[in-house]
Image: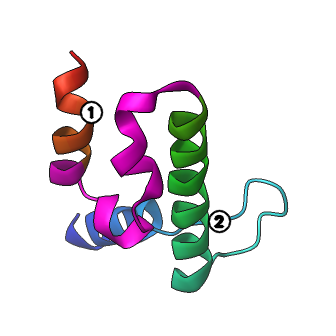
Amino acid sequence: MFQLLDMLKFYSRFEISDETGDPLTDHDMTQIHYSRITSLQKAAFAKFPDLRSFSLANVASVDTRETLIKHFGPLR
């Protein structure tokens, strides 16, 4: 039973490409994450002037839950 759970944990965190089915490295996952945050920043820059500080920040400084809440929380 424990071996099955260990296998499930391993494969649930095993990232694969949706297009090719190939495994993704940590570097690949970081690139995907940065690309998504950058896309969000571009959309925010174009449509929401109140989010300029978020839009112009580097990705590493705005990619945590806490910083996202700090930037987007006042928009409620």
Q: Main secondary structure of the magenta part?
A: helix
Where residue 32 sits in the image (x, y, percent)? 60, 64
Q: Which quarter shows the C terminus?
A: top left
> Do the numbered discs 2 and 1 sit on residues whose CB atoms are within 8 Å?
no
Q: Which residues are magenta?
A: 47-67
Q: 23 or 1: nearer the eye?
A: 23
**Crowd band around label 1 with a 10 angstrom C-alpha radius: few (<14), some (14–19), many (20+):** few
- How many marks can you see? 2
**Residue position for label 2:** 16
Residue 33 vs residue 19, the one in the foreground: 33
- Which amino acid type is marked by label 2? Ile
Whether residue 20 sits left or right of residue 35 in the image: it is: right
Residue located beneath label 1 in the image? 72
Of tags 2 and 1, the one toward the viewer is 1
Q: Mark 2 to mark 1: distance in Å?
A: 31 Å
User: Which quadrant holds residue 5?
Assistant: bottom left
Tag 1: residue type? Answer: Phe
Horizontal relation, residue 68 to residue 74: left or right: right
